[in-house]
Amino acid sequence: MTPMPSPRPRPRSRSRAALGLAVPLLLLAGCASGGTATQSGPDTGTPTEAAPSATPRPSEAATVTPRLALTYDGGVLVLDATSLETVGDLELPGFNRLNGAGDGRHLLVSTAGRFQLLDAGTWSEPHGDHAHHYTQAPTFPDVAWEAEKPGHVVVHDGRTVLFDDGTGDVVAFDSAAVAESEHRALRELTTPSAHHGVAVELADGTLVVSEGTEDERTGTRVLDANGRTVASSDDCPGVHGEAVAADDAVVIGCEDGALVHVGATITKVSSPDPYGRIGNQAGSDVSPVVLGDYKSDPDADLERPTRVSLIDTRTAGLALVDLPASYSFRSLGRGDAGEALVLGTDGALHVIDPEAGTLVRSIPVVDAWEEPDDWQSPRPTLFVLDGSAYVTDPSTDTLHAVDIETGEIWNSVRLPVTPNELTGVTGDVPADDHDHAHDDPAHEDEADEDVHQD
């Protein structure tokens, strides 16, 4: 087992933060702290008033406090991302999936019948040229978006988009308003047929949405800000997964390559093999190259690939990189500088230069492992936050924090549960919010001080 070194101080935070008749994902109110819905609002796509509930008392912190959340069988565990100490343990029955909500504080849990909001209990409030930072106990607020089969949640450039696989309903809203009881969905639509799909909204209002049926996924459609179809493609069998690269280039995976969306132009990227499936991708807003998985055996019950794909959105080119081990769908990530990261079954974090298409180095983190046959079963998982790669090891119930730049494992902890999915929040204020006017008289003197905490 990997030794557990003493924790080091956390690095300074670097986060920056018509297809058919629209049938909205219904926002629920009155969910109990365990996440059980007890009251539903009208079918308007807007929140109803939440029932009164006890709210933890916040404490002011000296600096930004990132937090991690991981699922286990029966709940969600929330940890401080620096100390790795547990700060909350929330019960939630069943198999649950974690998604970012887009505001640096909240998460959306895909659980039975809904997208349940989770308040990770860390946030910052801008005051002129600086911000104040707060923490409190994590909770499940009385907010949830109803869904027959809650699927992908995509966060990009201040918009959060939900996709209901059971109905084909798509709802997009302002990420900053995810927890507000009065906010309205900014966009709603329903795909012609329900399917396991995905939708991505860009800064100019362009919406990329998958096309398909319950039995077959075939391509994508691009809508402008007014909902008009400006481009489409049916040349993407087995549509799955998405990633956004630099300059708002969107990549959608196919069983024979990928589709690259730049504005109203869709370009097919073909795999070098007749069957070359790219189903999971990881993008970076500082890199035009998207990291994807790559499977080439159409007859395999569970293929354990040893190659990853690099899709260049500038040229629509595809390169394959050989790795010394296989990996799983929870193995892909990106560093702050755009590094392509893959957690291998050899227990190492493999760092790839996406421009050169070469393996730069491999960092040993956990013991060797084998991907389980059941995709829902726990396996080592990678999540990247503020320059660190967080890696779980369910065989030992441990979590490790790795400095991507130096390769140092700077903290490790034994968990009280067996971890499954893993994600986190920055607790930070989006960069633009630091410039907001300072209109709180209680902080007028403070605003003039040279105090910038981030």
Image (spheres, rainbow, N blue to C red):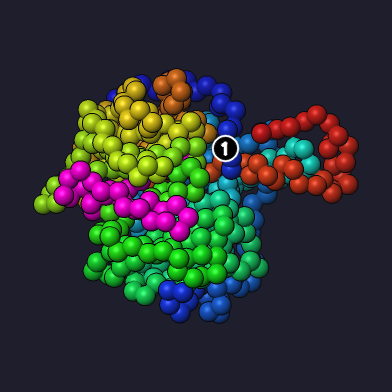
The residue segment tinted magenta is 255-284
Residue 188, how many percent across, how many down? 51, 71
The amino acid marked with disc number 1 is Ser
Which quadrant of the figure has residue 209? bottom left
Residue sitting nearer the eye, 357 or 139: 357
Residue 26, how many percent across, how many down? 50, 72
Q: Is residue 307 visible?
A: yes
Secondary structure found at label 1:
loop
Residue 358, how many percent across, how many down? 31, 27
Q: Residue at x 64, y 62 (%)?
A: 180
Q: Is residue 416 visible?
A: no
The count of marks equals 1
Residue 93, how many percent across, how many down? 39, 59
Which quadrant of the figure has residue 174? bottom right
Residue 192 covered by magenta stretch: no
Residue sitting nearer the eye, 271 or 136: 271
Residue on which the image places disc 1: 15
- Vertical comparison of 347 with 69: above or below: above
Q: Residues within 10 Å of mark 1 (few under 14, many from 20)?
A: some
Quadrant placement of the N terminus? top left
Q: Residue at x 24, y 43 (%)?
A: 294
- Vertical comparison of 37 with 75: above or below: below
Q: Residue at x 55, y 61 (%)?
A: 205
Quadrant placement of the C terminus? top right
- Vertical comparison of 240 with 356: above or below: below
Q: Is residue 318 left or right of residue 119?
A: left
Q: Is residue 276 left or right of residue 166?
A: left
Q: Is residue 376 left or right of residue 298?
A: right
- Vertical comparison of 428 with 98: above or below: above
Q: Residue at x 20, y 40 (%)?
A: 305
